[in-house]
Image (tube, rainbow, N blue to C red):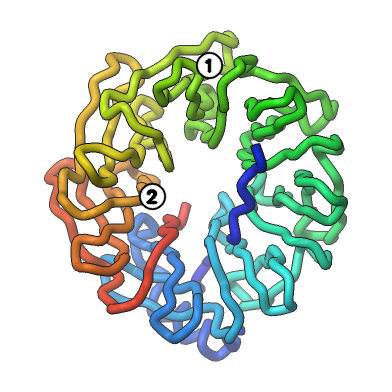
Amino acid sequence: MLKTSLLIVPIIGGTCIVLAFFSLRLGYALHTNRLAFTTERDGNYEIYVADTARDLMKNITRNPAADLGPVWSPDGTRLAFSSRREGASEVYVMDMGSGALTNISRSLGEDGGPAWSSDSRYLAFVTFREGNLEIFTADVQTGTLTNLSRNPANDSYPAWYGDWLAFVSDRDRNAEIYLLNVVTREAVNISQDIGSDLMPVWSDDGRYLAYISDRNSLPEIVIFDHRNGLTRRLKNIAGQWVYAMSWLPNNQYLVFETYARGNREIFMIDIISGKIENISDEPADDYTPSASPDGRDLAFVSMRESNWEVYVMDIPSRRITNISRSASWDAAPAWWP
């Protein structure tokens, strides 16, 4: 079987028959080759899952409302995404074995930006239901909702590893990175700077937390070492803001999107040596890199064929393949874990 977001920025069904057919076709493909993405090829935003090795893809949402931003659970059995099928933006979870779909956020306010716990039991998301941006968690087994941030400030961009939830908050008057222990509920400001600090991303082993900062007037990637509490700043030689980041699984390299030479490019940086390389190197805009679980492939979105398409790069050879191949808008690639 196939075991198988509206992202809120801080202020600062497919039928069972269709799914069963898809499961038979894709169930034993190499997991690294399975990719979910958002597309409007059917006239509205839907989520497709593609097997890039077998050149197969299937619409798994099949709803006239907008379905956006797929995020796989770490165990690969569920897919979270945002949808407006009940009016407001809500966070839904699809069980990829049964096809069952659950509205996990359940509010009249805007909900989005889902992030899974390491054990796939809980889902964090951002909500405006209490008049400010808060981070709630949902127990996907029981449906129980908990306000985890509980602060009058705006809290967003949740990123989960183990018992630790990193997030962005303006509770100290500017955007800062906090670490929240989900057991004790204690939150600590780890960036502590007058600049804006955004977009926390954990390395696969949970040792490092990367985030973006403009503390020195120029955008930098900051690496926080969770073992010893030390931080290092990696200068972005392109000198422009960083828009998205993804770790390679060896936890030594980061790929990121930045504005360079008049367009958006994807760079790779060695966090130890600081060596940086433009790996997309294309006059068209390239967006939102996502590294595969084995670190060999990189999915990203590009305008190189005049519309947003999802491409996969074999990192060692730099060979690039268009895997979405449509005249519509395709975005938000997410690898099966």
**Residue depicted at x 53% and y 22%:** 207
Left or right of residue 94, residue 138 in this image: right
What whole-number distance in Å separates the C-alpha atoms at marks 2 and 1?
24 Å
Q: At which x and y percent is residue 328?
A: 34, 77
Residue 85: name its quadrant: bottom right
- Is 187 rendered above or below residue 19? above
Task: Answer whether labels 2 and 1 touch (C-beta < 8 Å).
Answer: no
Q: Is residue 249 above or below residue 173?
A: below
Q: Nearer the viewer, mark 2 or mark 1?
A: 2
Q: Is residue 248 left or right of residue 206?
A: left
Residue type at the position of mark 1: Asp
Helix, strand or loop at label 1? It is strand
Classify 10 Å Cα crowding around label 1: few (below 14), some (14-19), many (20 and above).
some
Q: Is residue 118 visible?
A: no
Q: Nearer the viewer, residue 143 or 8?
A: 8
Residue 210 — which label? Answer: none
- Residue pictured at 67% horizontal, 26% vertical: 174
Query: Measured along the vertical axis of the image, is residue 178 above or below residue 2?
Result: above
Instruction: Give SS at disc 2.
Output: strand
What is the three-letter code of the residue carrying label 2?
Thr
State the residue at coordinates (28%, 33%): 268
Q: Which residue is mark 2?
A: 288
Would you identify the image quadrant in which residue 166 lies?
top right
Horizontal side of residue 299 vs 244, given as left or right: left
Between 165 and 126, the one nearer to me in the picture: 126
Mark nearer the N terminus (2 vs 1): 1
Residue 163 vs 329, above or below: the answer is: above
Q: Which mark is residue 225?
A: 1
List x then y, in percent, for residue 209: 53, 26
Q: Is residue 300 visible?
A: yes
The crowd level at tag 2 (other Cα within 10 Å; few <14, some 14-19, many 20+) is many
Residue pictured at 40% horizontal, 63% vertical: 331
